[in-house]
Image: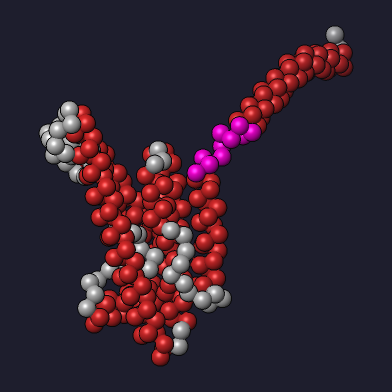
Amino acid sequence: MSRSASTRQAIRDAVSRHGSTQPRRSRFRRILASLSLVGLSVWLLFWAAGAFSPPAAVAELRTLVDQEVSRLNRVARNELPYSDQGLDMRKLFENMRDLPDSQRQQVRQEIGRLFSARERAEVGSFFALPPDRRLAELDRRIKADEARRQQWAAERAARNTSTQNQSGQTAATRDGNGPPNSRGPRPATGQPGQGDSGRQWGQGRGRTEEARNERMKNRLDATSPDDRAKRTEYRRALAERREKLGIAPGRGGSGRRPG
């Protein structure tokens, strides 16, 4: 066979082999496209069912926090006057206690955003005042904070008394109408060292401390040296003024967590 004939035969063989692979590649592409379509359909189905959306309680809280953070950012920029009023932090924490652990972390993140925004507004609005008005503003904030703390303490004492009365009545009923202080299984109080609830409380507190430390680190990373200097100076002035007024040092400004 001549060289030209051999070349033509080699070309025909190559074309034949190439053609035989086309159907396999085409089938593979169709299978891949079908699987992609099925996967997309499943994802859309879960999305429509709300599988990838935050729980209703978290979504509602996030909306409230977004609105409050927007307002506080305007306060920090001196576009709105500072006010002690805002979202009821006690209500937020009470609602968080009723949520499962899987949702509490999301709520903590939202509350952390709110605390950071409140602090920026508190510090920014203070330094936006003329120097001769800052002392009076410190006095107003400290007295408002102290009144709020006393109110929370009174409400907490009333809740504790009510809980103890209900526990006593339950024990009396269980023991055959005995005296309220009759012996019986003590209800879980959620305090350290008292049954499973105590252990859960302690574990939850440990996780909260870790989360708080992480938030503080992130906050420091996200603030400028000037912001940190102002916050330090504000805290110093606040503590110094509280001491002169004879009021015990607080855990922070008006945006602190209710005790």
Where residue 90 sits in the image (x, y, percent)?
Answer: 38, 55
Span of residues in magenta: 47-57
Answer whether residue 196 is visible to the viewer in this image: no
Question: Residue sitting at 49 percent across and 45 percent down?
Answer: 58
Numbered marks: total: 0
Question: Residue sitting at 19 percent across and 34 percent down?
Answer: 171
- Left or right of 78: which side holds 7? right
User: On screen, 41 above or below 141?
Assistant: above
- Left or right of 37: which side holds 157? left
Q: Tell me the colour scheme of the image.
A: secondary structure
Residue 52 is one of the magenta-drawn residues: yes
Q: Quadrant of residue 14?
A: top right
Where residue 140 sits in the image (x, y, percent)?
Answer: 37, 78
Which sits in the foreground, 119 or 87?
A: 87
Farthest residue, direction top: 1
Where residue 89 sits in the image (x, y, percent)?
Answer: 41, 57
For the stretch drawn in magenta, what is the main secondary structure? Answer: loop
Q: Quadrant of the N terminus?
A: top right
